[in-house]
Image (spheres, rainbow, N blue to C red):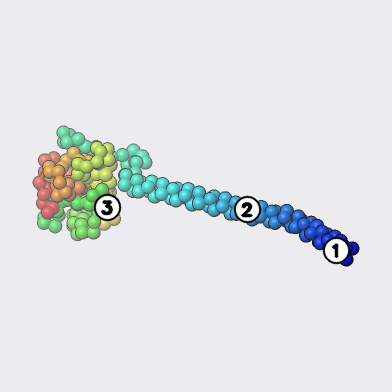
Amino acid sequence: MVIGRILSAVAVALLAVGCASQGGTRQPRATAEQRQIIEQQDRLRLAEERQKQARIQEEQAALQRHMQSRRQDKEPAAPQNRDEQPQIVRLSETSLSEGPLDDPTQSRVHLDASVSKRSIYYQFDAYNVDEQYEAVLTAHAKLLMGASALQMRVEGNCDERGSREYNLALGQRRADSVKRALSLLGVSTKQVSAVSFGSEKPKALGHNDTDWAENRRSDLMYVGIDGPHDTQQSSEIAR
């Protein structure tokens, strides 16, 4: 009996040692697997963070491009050469580079009702000619093409908002747009000149939307027929 109990105790001790030995070999293996999982999670978090930073930088760059594009659309482009420089005509100066007709009374040119409208109006900060003025420009184009000696001066004007330099450039764009429209209708570019008065030649003197709308215009003046003081009267015929 005693021997049997001793053998049983030895067997149990050997079994315990074996279990302990097997457990000791598994524990390091489980720890390595955990480390691999943790490292993989870290790599995923790092990749996600890099993607997030890349998206933020891309959005910021897109926003900057958008704002720069809006500024370029808002501001008039700088003239590329001397021919595109705004032509500044001071109000105190009455002499013009264009020569008047030698004898307007002998030219058989009569400014009838078809060309009584002498002004092209614009929306705020715009310079393209609206479709509603197609008939006005067509009438003036027919008159100019029928009298090659006739000369027109397109005077671009702006309201008082904006800097002097900005308004001069915008007024020049408005005058140039009318000159281009007349050219497309068949008028010789030698018969039409374009100048800018900026905001220095207002038609209305108030400081509200109605008066500003009156000052955003291009006036169509005939050299040798319209005197230097007839601009105000001619532009009032347009309405």
Q: Amino acid at mark 1?
A: Arg
Q: Quadrant of residue 138?
A: bottom left
- Between 128 and 20, the residue placed more toward the observer is 20
> Closer to the camera, 66 or 213?
66
In the rendered image, residue 83, in percent from the top left (x then y), is placed at: 32, 40
**Element on which disc 3 rests:** loop
Residue occupied by mark 2:
38
Q: Earlier in the sequence, mark 3 or mark 2?
A: 2
The residue where tag 1 is placed is 5
**Residue shown at 18%/39% (left/top)?**
200
- Image depth: mark 2 or mark 1 in front: 1
Q: Is residue 77 visible?
A: yes
Q: Nearer the viewer, residue 108 or 78?
A: 78
Question: On the image, numbered disc 3 is attached to which residue?
Answer: 128
- Where is residue 99? Give x, y as percent: 20, 40
Q: Nearer the viewer, mark 3 or mark 1?
A: 1
The answer to whether 214 is drawn above or below residue 82 in the figure is below
Contact between labelled residues 2 and 3, with CB atoms less than 8 Å apart = no
In the image, taking residue 5 as reference, residue 99 lies left or right, namely left
The kind of residue tagged 2 is Ile
Q: Tell me the kind of residue under disc 3.
A: Asn
Q: Earlier in the sequence, mark 3 or mark 1?
A: 1
Within-10-Å neighbours for mark 2: few <14, some 14–19, many 20+: few
Q: Residues within 10 Å of mark 3 (few under 14, many from 20)?
A: some
Residue 168: quadrant of the picture: top left
Task: Identify the secondary structure beneath mark 1.
Answer: helix
The N terminus - image quarter: bottom right
Q: CA distance from mark 2 to mark 1?
A: 49 Å
For image coordinates 60% across by 54% down, the residue present is 41
Q: Residue 30 location, x and y as percent?
A: 70, 56
Tag on residue 161? none
